[in-house]
Amino acid sequence: QVQLVESGGGLVQPGGSLRLSCAASGSIRSIYGMGWHRQAPGKQRELVAYITSGGSTNYPDSVKGRFTISRDNAKNTVYLQMNSLKPEDTAVYYCNANVMTLAGSNQNYWGQGTQVTVSS
């Protein structure tokens, strides 16, 4: 069993910054790609950042230049630094990880989500 636990969400004013963290624990042999997604009320979940095991990153145009994803492989943790936040960034943010478990299965896991609200 693998668990992903997010932290760092909250209320921030437009133009502000937040840093999200997501720590993976459990029966982990190795972690491949890790990502952050978000879902706003009435909208579909969308990818906002992705990082490979080697550190290559990918962002949609909506957050490029404002969000930065990084990971600490020794801690099985992925981070999302969010700068210049806008009201339209308001959503529940979820992390996910593609994990090779100790049992030898390759599975995708999700965190429980953390609320980010950008409002004055």
Image: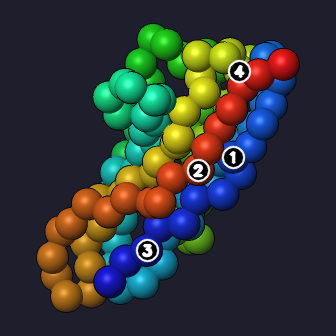
As displayed, is residue 16 above or below residue 86?
below
What element does badge 2 sit on?
A: strand
Of the residues shown, which amino acid type is indicated by label 1?
A: Gly
Residue 26 lies in what quarter of the image? bottom left
Instruction: Say if mark 4 contacts mark 3, CB within 8 Å.
Output: no
Q: Which residue matches tag 3?
A: 3
Q: Which residue matches tag 2?
A: 114
Percent from the top left, x then y, of residue 42? 39, 26
Mark 3 → mark 2, Cα distance in angstroms: 15 Å
The reply to whether residue 19 is in sight is: yes
What element does badge 3 sit on?
A: strand
Percent from the top left, x then y, of residue 102? 27, 86
As displayed, is residue 48 above or below residue 92?
above
Residue 108 lies in what quarter of the image? bottom left
Q: How many marks?
A: 4
Mark 4 → mark 3, Cα distance in angstroms: 28 Å
Give the number of the disc on residue 9. Answer: 1
Residue mark closest to the camera, 2 vs 4 = 2
Residue sitting farthest toward the left:
105
Of the residues shown, which amino acid type is indicated by label 3?
A: Gln
Q: Residue at x 71, y 51 (%)?
A: 8
